[in-house]
Image: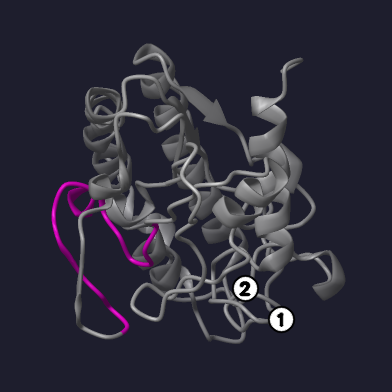
Amino acid sequence: MIRSSRARHPTAGSSPECGRAAVNYPSLVAEALDVVDFVDASCGGAVSGDLPGQQISAFTRTAVPPQYDALRPDTDLVTVGIGGNDVGLVQLAISCINLAAAPVGVSCAETATEEADPVDAAIDAFAPVYGTITDEIRARSPHARILFVGYPTGIRDGGCFPEQRIWPQDATYLQSKIDRLNAGMEQQVHAAGAAFVDLRASTIGHDACAAPEQRWMEGIVPTSPGIPLHPNAAGHRNAAEQVVGVLSPNS
């Protein structure tokens, strides 16, 4: 989240408890907008329940204050990125990793049946929570502009096996679930009167299958500093550009 007002002392930077770097996209947005009072409450591994509740850090096993505590009545901008951990996107990606030399064996896409797909069910059940989050932010910070930041393109259609050890059908399946979560987020936040920042389009061609110098999403084995299956520094720069673009007067 971002908080900005007229106070003189910013609260930002890296966080060992949360695995947060000082060059993540909220920090870059604050820098681009010359924000004088900035609070970055984002935390690695967070789920929606960690917004109102205390989170236990996956890195240090210490308690992290509720993210909503960063909100104030004079807050004028809030960015939110949430949902992937609630619906298990990282766990899904891990289940799609297969070290076999050829596409034989169990496919993660086979979790879907003709009757139902448990990942779809989880995403659809979670989507209304975006409206609840918007309402709570607005109650705490009634004058804030609220932006929900979507998820980038993780892997291209058909993947790039064996460079990324995810079989072609599983790569397509995995990205379809990221797209479904983005679509649900966009629909719900618009209905609640908030804005949605689309990262999908701008990151096409910069997924985990891209050449290392063009890669904004790290793969199973990172080729630059970053967490596997998460955006790297270039990915955060792009996210910041997209957020600033939505905030521009002509957007």
Quarter of the image with the C terminus in it: top right
Q: Is residue 80 left or right of residue 251?
A: left
The residue located at (23%, 48%) in the rendering is 69
Query: How did the renderer colour the structure?
Result: one colour
Q: x, y (%) of residue 39?
A: 43, 52
Report the front residue among 30 and 95.
30
Label 1 crowd bin: few (<14), some (14–19), many (20+), radius 10 Å: some
Measure how far apart labels 1 and 2 are at the Cα level.
10 Å
- For disc 1, the marked residue is 224
Q: Which label sits in the foreground, 1 or 2?
A: 1
In the image, which residues are magenta?
Answer: 42-59
Which circle's residue, 1 or 2, is located before the other in the chain?
2
Extreme residue toward the left, this view: 53
Q: Is residue 190 depicted above or below 12 in this figure?
A: above
Asked if residue 172 is among those painted magenta in the image, a careful observer would answer: no
The quadrant where residue 127 appears: top left
Element assignment for label 1:
loop
Disc 2 residue type (three-letter): Gly
Residue 219's tag is 2
Disc 1 residue type (three-letter): Ser
